[in-house]
Image (tube, rainbow, N blue to C red):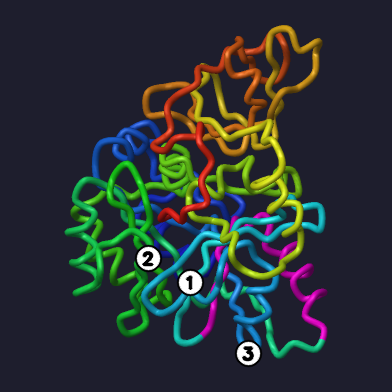
Amino acid sequence: MNNAWNTFLLEHGAHIDDGVLRDFGDPQTERRAARDGDVLADLSALSLIRASGADARTFLNGQLTNELGLVNATQHQLSAWCSAQGRALALFRVFQRDGDLYLQLPSSLREAILKRLRMFVLRAKVTFEIVDDELIRFGIVGPNAERLAQKAIKDFSLEIGASVTRGTATLLRLPGIHPRFEIIAPPTEAISLWETLRADATPVASGAWYWHDIMTGIPNVFTETSDAFVPQMLNLELVGGVNFKKGCYPGQEIVARMQYLGRLKQRMYRAHVVGDVVAPGTPIFASGANGQSVGNVVDAQPSPNAGVDLLAVIQIASTETALRLRDENGPTLSLQPLPYSVETPTTQKTSA
């Protein structure tokens, strides 16, 4: 975390442990605010990798599942980077700023992904670097988030998927159960913008942002689940993260075969469970499965309503049976509706 940003947050009541912002003093109140009100979410748990150079776009377009030609100064996108076996190593929020491309992903993956990206560069004119200290990330979410975002950055498109840079600040519009925006700016401007907005919004940690991802059905890939899921298992083609008309990329044949010739046996579902924090990758079991796991947690966050809300990849055939977390005698999962259908796969691009 940037030192100036770290000091600023501490001065405003943040509880930071080993460089991770846990809360601002009242986690339960902050969770309820994320559900019902307007919040400012520190996003230091997300990292930025900057891709620079004449071949940056061409190189990345040959690596990611989405069409990088659609990313420009006014549009961002979600995309996956897969292994040769078609499993997602990372999911990126990709946006353009000052002519460079930026890949946003969970901080826990940044070193491994940066190292792997550099391995594939060969003679391409592209460089990758982590720019977390240069650019602060925070989110605005809530019923009044559109008004607050306009207060911070004037005159921008309110459409989901929109991106705009004004001066040194970039704003992204994301899907959500409430209007949701992310601001990326140098430390001095980020501090100024946060100060401008905090009178009208409750400061929260990044868990609230991930909770909104869960409620919106937007997946994340963490260290525990890297190289675990084919994009369709994460519903990525349903939320605009895969383009089936583009050229080759690692794992493309497997992803395409799954879409057009295969039978998808696992999907990502939203669920609720009574209990404490659940880690990504935690196994899920079903009645009659003879002790075999039928799925794994993708992401989980404490619920404002108590318990835990989560996304999990689960065998479709097992979703009509009793599902339990961790083992066959663990707490029962209650499946919840997603804001999109998982019944009919589609290749039509949606905003994410």
Q: Which residues are magenta?
A: 100-122
The residue that mark 3 highlights is 53
Q: Is residue 183 left or right of residue 36?
A: right
Q: To which quarter of the image does residue 278 belong?
A: top right
Q: For mark 1, does the 10 Å Cα neighbourhood hold few (<14), some (14 to 19), or many (20 or more) residues?
A: many
* Residue appearing at x 20%, y 59% in the figure: 148
Q: Which comes before the other along the chain, label 2 or label 1?
A: 1
The residue that mark 2 highlights is 172
Q: Are marks 2 and 1 in contact (CB under 8 Å)?
A: yes
| Mark 3 residue element | loop
Is 124 drawn above or below residue 137 in the view shown? below
* Residue appearing at x 58%, y 56% in the figure: 19
* Residue appearing at x 40%, y 79% in the figure: 73
Q: To which quarter of the image does residue 151 belong?
A: bottom left
Which sits in the foreground, 208 or 195? 208
Specify the quadrant that holds the N terminus.
Answer: bottom right
